[in-house]
Image (cartoon, rainbow, N blue to C red):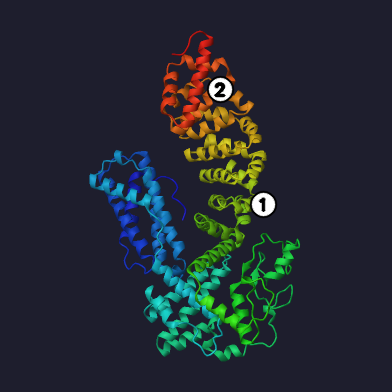
Amino acid sequence: MMGYSGFLPSGCLLESLIHVSNEIASMEKLPFIQVRNISTMIRRIKLLSSLFEELKEINTPLPPSSVLCLTELFSVIRRVKVLIEGCKHGSSLWGLIQTEFISNQFFVIVKEIARALDILPLSLLNITTDIREQVELLHRQAKRVELFVDCRELQRRDELVKVMASNNEKNRKNQSFIDIETVKEVLSSIGLRSSLDYEEEISKLEAEAQKQAGTGGLIVVSNINNLISLVSYSKSLIFSSLQSEKTKEDIKHQPYAYINRNLDQSSFSQSMFSNIPDEFRCPISLDLMKDPVIVASGHTYDRNSIAQWINTGHHTCPKSGQRLIHMALIPNYALKSLVHQWCQDNNIPFTDCSSSNTSEMDRSNSKKKACEKAIDHISATKVATDAVKMTAEFLVGKLAMGSPDVQSQAAYEMRLLAKTGADNRRIIAEAGAIPFLVTSLSSSDPRIQENAVTALLNLSILDNNKVLILAAGAIDNVVEVLESGKTMEARENAAAAIFSLSMMDDFKVAIGAHPRAIPALVGLLREGTTVGKRDAAIAIFNLALYNANKASIIIAGVVPLLIELLMDDKAGITDDALGVLALLLSCPEGLEAIKKSRVLVPLLIDLLRFGSAKGKENSIKLLLGLCKDGGEEVARRLLFNPRSIPSLRSLAADGSLQARRKADALLRLLNRCCSQSRNPVG
């Protein structure tokens, strides 16, 4: 969902807010998943609904900032409705598999409510004390809220994954396909208790598979079909024989019904081959594919063969000759499972090449048992990591082959996934996402561009990803977004990305050498919002730490602009502006540019009195530098200002250690200047 754009008249806006809030508050028969997140969210919306109704009853003009807040809340509450309805009407089993991702969506929405309430001027609204206190309490709680993932849902999800993982590794002849009691318990916990419930869940899973089909989500579609087979087979075991017969017939026609071969052993035995089927052979080596992977062209190869092909300098698909737009190798889990089963049925040793680098093709029975035991006791951490890996690979597929809407959603989901955790950032990069995100920066779709640059910003927090981002040629695209991004948020996040990338010294050189990077940052410093100006100032400061960049920064006109921003109370970047000026003072060009200003010295004197602790330190640093290198002229201007000496003495007595030292040094310098003119400072 994209944010609501434009402003409704306040009356219509309040009506819309009340309507959508009441729709959420009146929801009945809530889902069995995300119970706490949904109930807590509904309670928050009910509290906000009371505010909306009271504002409507008052019927007085609203302050502009409150209209902005209400407009943002309208967008957020509509997303709440969509999210809850998705949990309610979508597949409960698929929701259980995605429990962490959905929980994070609730968390993000609560944080957006908190940000919207940040700008709500309660003191200007003529509302009752009770409503004001309720909203203030909600605001405080929303700001402090932490991500909540139901541990019971995680446990159920992990139990289900363990059952499927362990049984996929076993020879299931003369054995039941699944631990039916465990599966029954998990399915019952998410509301599947009758035959009709199972049929409805299968329909929802089929709808989800159809929704994902054609968007590059090969892995996800495969997993959903596996779940369909699992639910269908469980239903056949749990319920009546009549239903069981019908379910068997349905499962035989499922695309991925191979996981249930024990339902009809004869049909599978007829399909076994003494020789390797052509579809199981790698097109390069013609050997059995033990670890099949999908390349950008959509063709499947054995991982070792295609990796050798790419590593020798080839960038085309061996089968089609098509140039590969990325080098990501996406595991083909569906085909791998088919190959594994064929090997078991034909008593052919199977080595999982993806989990081991060994060249041995035959393992002892004891090693096989050890492997099975390890899978049976798969850790929750590994399950979570595998889930992130699966999601990342799926999203890369969406970015590669999806429509603009699908690409936008994929970039947004990747942006959220990369927001927390170094492991997530590493896994996303390993899935091959970075080249696609860099390419997406040139998109004409504002949503794709904004989400892509923000995802890259989040990924760049990990140092190794910084290297991969620059290797993908990201500087040109990021600078282009910084100069002329489709939205201000995209431009701001591009500046933040430059700051993040420039944390590495080598990249300060590369970014500073780009002819448009520094001018683009200065442009955002001039045109951006308060957040954008601050992002630009911090990025410029970081680049200025490399001395060779200082001249380019000064030529771009940053000094007069920063001094102008110091005079603007609404700019909100005083400390950042002072930090950049203090850094530029150390080079001759910077000193000359700063000395040209006739308003800076009075400004700095005022900041000695009213600035922050950091602001005072940089102000005294600037004054001392100007007096040392600017000669008697700046010293005289300080002496003639009646506020300067008291401010310096106060700072020398009560300032930070660095500020006290510089204030003492400046007072001594002024004393010498006074003594030379026979007018000593008292």
Place of residue 258 in the rendered image (x, y in percent of width and height, measured from the top left): 56, 82
Q: Where 53 sits versus 344, above or below?
A: above
* Residue type, label 1: Ala
Q: Where 214 sits versus 370, above or below?
A: above
Q: Quadrant of the C terminus?
A: top left
- Say few, some or many: other residues with alpha carbon within 10 Å of mark 2 (under 14 / 14 to 19 / 20 or more): many
Place of residue 148 in the rendered image (x, y in percent of width and height, measured from the top left): 40, 60
Discs 1, 2 touching: Cβ within 8 Å = no
Q: Residue at x 46, y 79 (%)?
A: 231
* Residue type, label 2: Leu
Residue 626 - label: 2
Q: Secondary structure at mark 1?
A: helix
**Residue 598 visible somewhere in the drawing:** yes
Q: Nearer the viewer, residue 627 or 34?
A: 627
Cα distance, mark 1 to mark 2?
A: 42 Å
**Residue 92 visible somewhere in the drawing:** no
Q: Nearer the viewer, residue 361 or 461?
A: 361
Q: Nearer the viewer, residue 439 or 569?
A: 569
- Say few, some or many: other residues with alpha carbon within 10 Å of mark 1 (under 14 / 14 to 19 / 20 or more): few
Q: Where 460 sits versus 119, above or below?
A: below
Q: Secondary structure at mark 2?
A: helix
Q: Where 45 sits versus 253, above or below?
A: above
Report the number of discs.
2
Q: Quadrant location of residue 496?
A: top right
Q: Residue at x 48, y 38 (%)?
A: 529
Q: Is residue 282 left or right of residue 23?
A: right
Residue 471 - label: 1
Identify the mark nearer the N-term, 1 or 2.
1
Q: Residue at x 51, y 32 (%)?
A: 577
Place of residue 587 in the rendered image (x, y in percent of width and height, measured from the top left): 62, 28
Place of residue 639 in the rendered image (x, y in percent of width and height, measured from the top left): 48, 15
